[in-house]
Amino acid sequence: DAGVTQSPTHLIKTRGQHVTLRCSPISGHKSVSWYQQVLGQGPQFIFQYYEKEERGRGNFPDRFSARQFPNYSSELNVNALLLGDSALYLCASSVRGARNEQYFGPGTRLTVT
Amino acid sequence: AQKVTQAQTEISVVEKEDVTLDCVYETRDTTYYLFWYKQPPSGELVFLIRRNSFDEQNEISGRYSWNFQKSTSSFNFTITASQVVDSAVYFCALKAGGSQGNLIFGKGTKLSVKP
């Protein structure tokens, strides 16, 4: 079975631009979470969605938004990009909530110049 | 407040040595879950283990073993007879605070196993 997939793999954007990252969960998983991992740090929670509803939000500005589609795939949007948004963005899926183990995708490496 | 501390930033060992990665957590919740993940250079986080707060039984899986001690709020990870392929960054994570999900990660321990 396919694991969590994310696209694109790498992305280079300019300050002030907008970016959309995509994630497809493991088949049968209804929960998707997004994390930001800055170089040298552990991942930080951004959003969790379950059954297309937002179930959790981390300490990130309103420039960050997300949604989950009927097929349980998800998008993370970031507006007005800042240099500090450069990071690896990880998507994780789980059967239900995060008390179940979360399985991570390979991530999208975003560079903001 | 909930927090995970991995005090060891980097560890370097020679192949076949045993190595223990430390993890100390903080939470006021009585129900919580602890996880270990491995992040090889490719970047993808690989799930290794989940323990819940009511199960203090230690676990062994091949060369990997985990020691969960609530009395010291620790969830340590030992690799026996380390191999070069074990080289990676290892993260300990905590999930608490009800059914809404997010993992709180430590800063990770970079393990280098030299031949």
Image (cartoon, coloured by chain):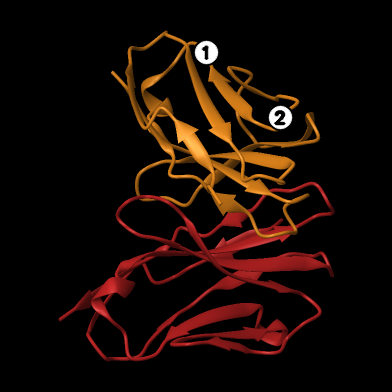
Chain colours: A orange, B red
Residue under the point 59% across and 62% down: B93
Give the mark nearest the N terminus, 1 or 2: 2
Asked where in the image residue B80 lies, by quadrant, the reply is bottom left
Q: Residues within 10 Å of mark 2 (few under 14, many from 20)?
A: some
Quadrant the C terminus of chain A occupies: top left
The residue that mark 2 highlights is A71
Q: Is residue A49 above or below residue B110?
A: above
What is the chain letter for disc 2? A
Residue appearing at x 32%, y 51% in the figure: B42
Residue identifier under label 1: A79
Apparent side of residue A14 relative to residue B60 in the rendered image (left or right): left
Query: Where residue A3 sits in the image (x, y, percent)?
Result: 53, 48
Q: Nearer the viewer, mark 1 or mark 2?
A: 2
Task: Quote the CA–CA distance across marks 1 and 2.
Answer: 24 Å
Extreme residue toward the left, this view: B115
**Residue B60's x, y, as percent?**
56, 89
Residue A90, how many percent across, how many down?
A: 50, 41
User: The disc numbered 1 marks a residue on which chain?
Assistant: A
| Image mark for residue B29 | none
Q: Are marks 1 and 2 on the same chain?
A: yes
Name the residue located 48 percent from the left edge and 35 percent from the top edge: A6
Relative to B1, say whether A20 is above or below. above
Mark 2 secondary-structure assignment: loop
Q: Residue furthest front?
A: A1
Residue type indicated by callout 2:
Asn
Instruction: Evaluate if marks 1 and 2 touch, with contact meaning CB atoms under 8 Å apart.
Output: no
Kind of residue at badge 1: Asn
The quadrant where residue A11 appears: top left
**Residue A61, percent across and down?**
60, 23
